Image: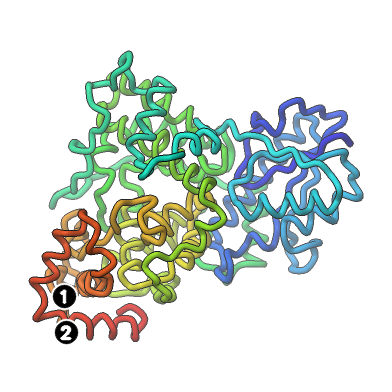
Amino acid sequence: MRDLVIVLGDQLDPASAAFDDFDPTRDSVWMAEAQAETRTGTFPAHQRRLVLFFSAMRHFRDGLRARGVHVCYHALALAPGAERGHGLADILAEDVPRLAPERLVVLEPGDYHVRRSLEAVAETLGLALDIRTDRHFYTTVADFEHWARGRRSLLLEDFYRRLRRRHGVLMDGGSPAGGVWNLDHDNRRAFGRQGPGWIEPPPSFRPDATTRAVMETVTARFGDHPGDMAGFDLAVTPAQAQQVLVHFIDVRLPAFGTWQDAMWTGGHQLYHSRLSAALNMHLITPQACVEAAVAAWREGRAALNHVEGFVRQILGWREYVRGIYWSRMPGYAGLNHLGHEGALPAAYWSGETSMRCMADAMDNVLTNGYAHHIQRLMVLGLYAQLYGVHPYRFHEWHMAMYLDAVDWVSLPNTLGMSQFGDGGVMATKPYCASGAYVRRMSNYCRGCRFDPAKASGPDACPLTTLYWDFLDRHRERLTGNHRMRLQLKNLQRRSEELPAIRAQAAALRDKGGE
């Protein structure tokens, strides 16, 4: 054997750089479902997440074999303990002496620790490890670092405009299409009392024999993990992911921008694409998503504000987050700017809470292994931040519970943007708000036993109580932040109520969140 090409579970693209100069007569592919990947730290992974990853990996394996590629594949057995090794690197270290390749090849991993473990295995075995640049992305880590070098602040807007110009996306010569770069003023509205109305459901894919076999294993081995697999119908192949994209462009994109931040009880998807998992597993490319959206605008099928909002998330935010991750690791994972040390409240596992916003968001997570970005940031993330959860613990929970979580994208979004653990690398101020934000952007507060306008007393909203307590606890640290001046000024107006707020916040933590 010449090359042993290692394919990880988030690299399921047969056209990736890992297969450049691949010769099926001399090279082989290596893949493994590792027992260690069924947990994140001490947190058990969501059952639906396990089914999605392992099913997509097996379909990818079968596609390679159909093309005459030899694939050495380790599938988790129905019975625990039947497979060799616990972690990915352990299994690889056992296999390499038998396979005897001249070198190892892998696409840039999406997890810093996975990359380091593969490098350690290769060094121990005395083999060269060829780590190849991932063409899936619009830019490279080196390019991001070049852009970031010497800058006082790493603003997404600057990076996003640079990529728009470089790749000619939504550009009219040297100017942005429509004459403006950012159309947020047309976006992010609430539904109002009428709600979102009926939205055509996304494509549904009946589990085939391969997926059913994975489901059987997950039931036997990991049936006590969070969530369940009932009604599993997710895209596990590139062809299926393409169908999801076409549906989004035709049905949801024409209203996406306006309602991308709106929430509604039982609205688990609303106008969002649900493409993030397929994107992060490389079942579909960001280029395909962006090109399809831009084509819809040029053909008059979607207004510019909707298309720009979608493009910004992929061409801008996704690329930006990856650059932050790889340019700041491994130290980034240990950041805890606010000094929070708390554990996650029990509701993050059970979904049992009287807070309607938390209950609905957790129902989405437990049922679907998903929640759209505002549920993540301004409900689940907000509550964890105000409560005082350790930022890395929140990241581990996110990695365990979400279908689309990969370390490079999860860590900056959770530890950085959501929890402000990085002290301002990702966001210029903490994303902190009271229950008033939730009331404005959703119908959750209607019929909830808690009043978002109250910070103390038996019917005070826990978000509001913890919000004022958060500002009080961190006022010295936040005083120098000009974007926090108004919020801190409003805190001064509550000076008489602060003792009661502090006591109620302490009681919330003593009781595990409610």
Farthest residue, direction front: 150
Q: Is residue 177 above or below residue 4?
A: above
Q: Which mark is residue 500?
A: 2
- Mark closer to the observer (2, 1): 2
Foreground residue among 472 and 402 = 472
Query: In the picture, which quadrant includes the N terminus?
Result: top right
Q: Residue at the location (76% across, 25% down)?
A: 21
Q: Which residue in the protein does label 1 denote?
A: 455
Residue 497 visible in image: yes
Nearer-N-terminus badge (2/1): 1
Q: Amino acid at mark 2?
A: Ala
Q: Disc 2, disc 1: CB below 8 Å?
A: yes
Badge 2, how many Cα within 10 Å: few under 14, some, many 20+?
some
Residue 367, horizontal then vertical, whole percent: 44, 60
Say left or right for 274 vs 38: left
Q: What residue is drawn where x is 42% and y is 33%?
A: 315
Report if residue 227 is visible in the image.
no
223 over 287 or under it: above or below: below
Q: Amino acid at mark 1?
A: Ala
Left/right placement of residue 460 relative to residue 208 reads: left
The reply, left or right, for residue 116 in relation to residue 255 is right
Q: Which mark is residue 74?
A: none
